[in-house]
Amino acid sequence: MRRFIISLSLSALFMCACSMQTNTEKNTPATGKQEKTNDSRALTFDADSAYHFVEKQVSFGPRIPNTPEHTACGDYLTFKLKEYGAIVTEQRADLKAYDNTILKARNIIGSFLPEAPERILLCAHWDTRPYSDNDPDPSNHHQPVMGANDGASGVGVLLEIARQLQKKLPAVGVDIIFFDAEDHGAPYFYKGVNNGEETWCLGSQYWAANPHTPDYKAKFGILLDMVGSPTATFYKEGYSMQMAPLIVEKIWKEAISMGKGGLFVNGTGGTITDDHLFVMRGRAFPCIDIIDFNPHTTGFGSYWHTINDTMEEIDRETLKSVGEVVLSVIYSKQSSKKE
Ligand code: AHN
Ligand code: ZN
């Protein structure tokens, strides 16, 4: 496990040398659907809806770049964001994997209130790992991960948030980014030389160097990673605490005040190389990681990078708690207050 927890790297250099070709398409759906409303209907994060979005992604099969399943799922995610009234930017790039394979990667970005100067970034990775290289049975190490939790759960929560945003626009602009090629990091069995932590999070590294709007900045960002397990615990992640402590404290305080202190634990967890790290290094705004990692037990859950990361690892209550906390942060008056 320890090899997955990277202590603070001295290297501030992460500029993605892996982009060979890029192509950005913007789609502009009718925005008439997006009407600001002043009514005070309580926003309700629908756990069944979020669960369905997770199940739907899993139904495509593993979402590994350069496969038809990946293409089909990417098309679905783009369609859903447009359906919920977001302005969608598809950022396509050819990214070089640890073994020099070119990954046809696709970051999918949905913007609500695209003109609003004050913005919140919500993100999750949508690709899945080609190797179950943490499975207890070594004969499974070359099998793909299904990624119900590791991938689909964060995206499922964010699709449900998108559905809610369409019903009632918040006071701030919101960008939802589904990052690609997060989970294609070098497996332990690869014998070639590789760049270690930089083999992970290729989509977010690309976006951080090439944001979808010039000089993109958000007030803060929230990354959701493995937010569906019935046994989840969310400790305060190490890089988030080092680089975005005020946002961590604000979100955990909100979660605990909502009675979710069993899930959002008031304690420090692992220091984890994840998309939020590259967002912060590249764009210089705070971005925290809500990630299932228990420093007192097994670190990542026992399903992590195994063939058991299936729908059995998804609990509606966990999805709902995370969704409610994120919605509450987006709609709280504090979101528009200067800090
Ligand atoms: C590493 O294993 C280097 N980072 C964990 C990030 C991750 C992988 N999140 C999901 N899968
Ligand atoms: Zn993973």
Image: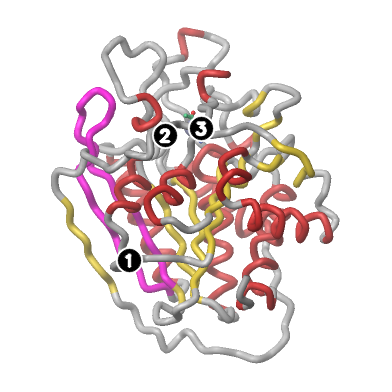
Asked which secondary structure carries label 3, the reply is: loop
Q: In this view, does 129 lie to the left or right of 40?
A: left
Which of the two labelled residues, at mark 3 and mark 2, occupies the earlier sequence position?
3
User: What residue sits right under mark 1 in the picture?
Assistant: 215
User: What residue sits right under mark 3 in the picture?
Assistant: 8
The 10 Å Cα crowd at callout 2, few under 14, some 14 to 19, many 20 or more, is many
What is the span of residues highlighted in magenta in the rendered image?
Answer: 86-111
Residue at position x 66%, y 58% in the image: 323
Quadrant, the N terminus: top right
User: What residue sits right under mark 2 in the picture?
Assistant: 183
Quadrant, the C terminus: bottom right
Identify the colour scheme used: secondary structure
**Quadrant position of residue 131:** top left
Does the beta carbon at disc 2 come under 8 Å from ligand 2?
yes
The stretch drawn in magenta includes residue 92: yes
Does the beta carbon at disc 3 come under 8 Å from ligand 1?
no
Q: In this view, does 274 lie above or below 331?
A: above
